[in-house]
Amino acid sequence: MSPPSPALDVLVTGGTGYVGRPLVEALVARGHRVRVLCRPDSRVRVPAGAEAVDGDALAATSIAAAAVDDGTLVHLVGTPHPNPSKAAEFERVDLASIQASVAAARAAGIAHLVYVSVAHPAPVMQAYVEARSRGEDAIVRSGLTATILRPWYVLGPGHRWPVVLVPVVKLLEWLPWTRDGARRLGFVTLRQMVGALVHAVEHPPAPAERRIVEVPAIRTPGSGDDPRSGG
């Protein structure tokens, strides 16, 4: 990864979770000023060097109060271990939290919103894809400057069961008639995901632009970002 950019003010929601903790550690190591919005009982999980801020990631006022004007907001809140039985949680947590972050970003004058969505279209997990897609729509309608990352499954500690499918996915990525879909829905590692998020934070798109980062670009940050201007 290239040398750190000038220090940025970054607020992370979901910063004590599976992707959030290593991301916060990476941002702190690169000299950024990082705040983590968390519940009081999660303070012990906030990595050293970051500031823990008590708050509610489902409440726009709480997020806005923790944000720094002209800073970056990274939204990582979501239902852990999503599966089809959790459709109600996708609405209550995943969708509600990104809607709150969008409202907070507008109210607090956030310069750049980074959102982890999900790869789509996809043949499974329809309720999850729907909730995340509606989150993307909320960002586009807001006119915010944003980067939207679309992983399918992030392989890492406690999230390794799909590793047995990696050879199959590699084959599908190689075959011309399945290549596009397989690449869009391919696996990424936790290290790749954190690297792509750090790159997104340090390289925001132009003002009022929405950048979409699909799986191939998550695997190699900066190699194939797809800048798209919204509405």
Image (spheres, rainbow, N blue to C red):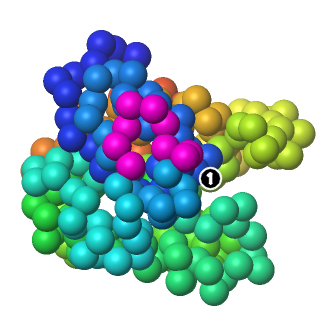
The reply to whether the magenta stretch includes residue 97 is no
Mark 1, secondary structure of its residue: loop
Nearer-the-camera pick, 159 or 139: 159
Q: Quadrant of the N terminus?
A: top left
Number of other residues with Cα within 10 Å of mark 1, as a class: few under 14, some 14 to 19, many 20 or more: many
**In the rendered picture of this protein, how many numbered marks are placed on residues?**
1
Residue furthest toward the top? 3
Q: Position of residue 203 (x, y in %)?
A: 24, 34
Nearer-the-camera pick, 92 or 37: 37
Image point 57% across, 71% down: which residue? 129
Q: Position of residue 59 (x, y in %)?
A: 35, 77
Image point 65% across, 76% down: which residue? 126
Measured along the vertical axis of the image, is residue 145 above or below residue 45?
below
Nearer-the-camera pick, 168 or 45: 45
Residue furthest toward the bottom? 88
Q: Position of residue 174 (x, y in %)?
A: 71, 33
Amino acid beneath label 1: Trp
Left or right? Give the position of 160 relative to 97: right
The reply to whether the magenta stretch includes residue 48 is yes
Measured along the vertical axis of the image, is residue 186 above or below residue 209?
above
Residue 152 visible to an observer of this rendering: yes
Image point 29% across, 71% down: which residue? 62
Residue of label 1:
152
Image point 49% across, 37% down: which residue? 47
The magenta region covers 44-52
Q: Quadrant of the C terminus?
A: bottom left
Q: Position of residue 111 (x, y in %)?
A: 14, 51
The image quadrant of residue 200 is top left
Residue 75 visible to an observer of this rendering: no
The image quadrant of residue 82 is bottom right
Left or right? Give the position of 75 relative to 170: left
Left or right? Give the position of 127 relative to 104: right
